[in-house]
Amino acid sequence: MIKNAVEHPIPLRARSERGWDQKIIIKDRNRIPRHNRRFWSTQPGIRFSIRLHPLLIKSSRYFRTNTRTEVPPMSTTLPEDVYPESLNRLPMLEREDLDEQGKRAFDALLSPKARSIAGLQGPGGIWLHSSKMAEVQREFTRLLRQENGFGDRLTELAILVAARESNHQFEWTVHEPVALKEGLEPSILDIVKYRKPTDGLPQVEKLIIDFGRQLLRENKVHPKLYAATEKALGRTGIVNLVGLMANYVMTGIMLNAFDQQLKPGLKPLLPMP
């Protein structure tokens, strides 16, 4: 314990492993609880550590409500109707179980050249139960992701907007690392993730986020925003943008229907709702 650390009420700022940024005021040194956390005083030149009791971490007596919604914890058990191999309500198919069209879709899904993130434990594995649709859907998704004219960085931004506005944990969690790898700035990612204002963003990034938010929240796009987006992306570009977002909203519906679970050990990254 630091002597005289709390002779006067000291406003402190706490940061946990999840990046929370909360304020706490301790007036009585005898009430400083115990648990590993580091605190920085908002007064210049004061920086020290205390220990905070686990039962008091979420207590409103010490913490004020944060503006960020907490990311849900990882699930340790699967629902009773979910297969452990596929992590959804449908069994995982083997290649020999499929017809010729299904085998082509299976091979494309697992090809080294494929850009499937989840493999068989995701939408690709679900679609294999309808082999005709699987082959068509896979090619449609490939075209929307790889030949939309946006480049990988903006493509992933559009996918994240669709995932955030539909509150889809699976899609967000698997695509957030990909978006960062493709060069999407963490600051822009956080604007989508925490639904922050888009003021100050580059024009195209701002339009993609604003367009997706308005479309998916209001089920329409106002004329002024539509005109600005079409001017920036072109007619082909705006069609591709809507198609890309719509495809991932549809994928989210498929994943919800079959209760697709994240892979064991994969931490949920999207605050809900």
Image (cartoon, helix red, strand yellow):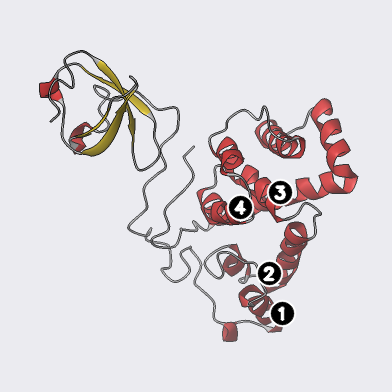
- Gap in Å between the C-alphas at discs 1 and 2? 9 Å
What residue appears at the point 71 percent right and 35 percent down from the top-left corner? 206
What residue appears at the point 55 percent right and 51 percent down from the top-left corner? 176
Identify residue type, mark 3: Leu
Identify residue type, mark 1: Gln
Q: Is residue 255 above or below residue 22?
A: below
Label 2 crowd (10 A; few <14 / some 14-19 / many >=20): many
- Gap in Å between the C-alphas at discs 2 and 3? 26 Å
- Gap in Å between the C-alphas at discs 4 and 1? 31 Å
Label 4 crowd (10 A; few <14 / some 14-19 / many >=20): many
Give the mark nearer the N terminus: 1 vs 2: 1
- Gap in Å between the C-alphas at discs 4 and 3? 9 Å
**Looking at the rendered structure, which numbered label has been put on residue 134?**
2
Identify residue type, mark 4: Ala
Give the mark nearer the N terminus: 3 vs 1: 1
Frontmost residue, 170 versus 260: 170
What residue appears at the point 76 percent right and 39 percent down from the top-left corner? 204
Toward which corner of the image does residue 99 lie, by quadrant? Answer: bottom right
- Asked whether residue 41 appears in the rendered view, the answer is yes
Give the mark nearer the N terminus: 4 vs 1: 1
In the rendered image, which residue does mark 1 sit on? 101
- Gap in Å between the C-alphas at discs 3 and 1? 32 Å
Question: Secondary structure under badge 3?
Answer: helix
Instruction: Tell which tag, 3 or 1, sits nearer the viewer.
Output: 3
Q: Position of residue 132 (x, y in %)?
A: 72, 72
Question: Secondary structure under badge 2?
Answer: helix
Whether tag 1 and tag 2 are in contact, CB under 8 A, the answer is yes
Disc tally is 4
Q: Is residue 213 left or right of residue 83?
A: right
- Asked whether residue 166 appears in the rendered view, the answer is no
Q: Is residue 83 left or right of residue 157?
A: left
Give the mark nearer the N terminus: 4 vs 3: 3
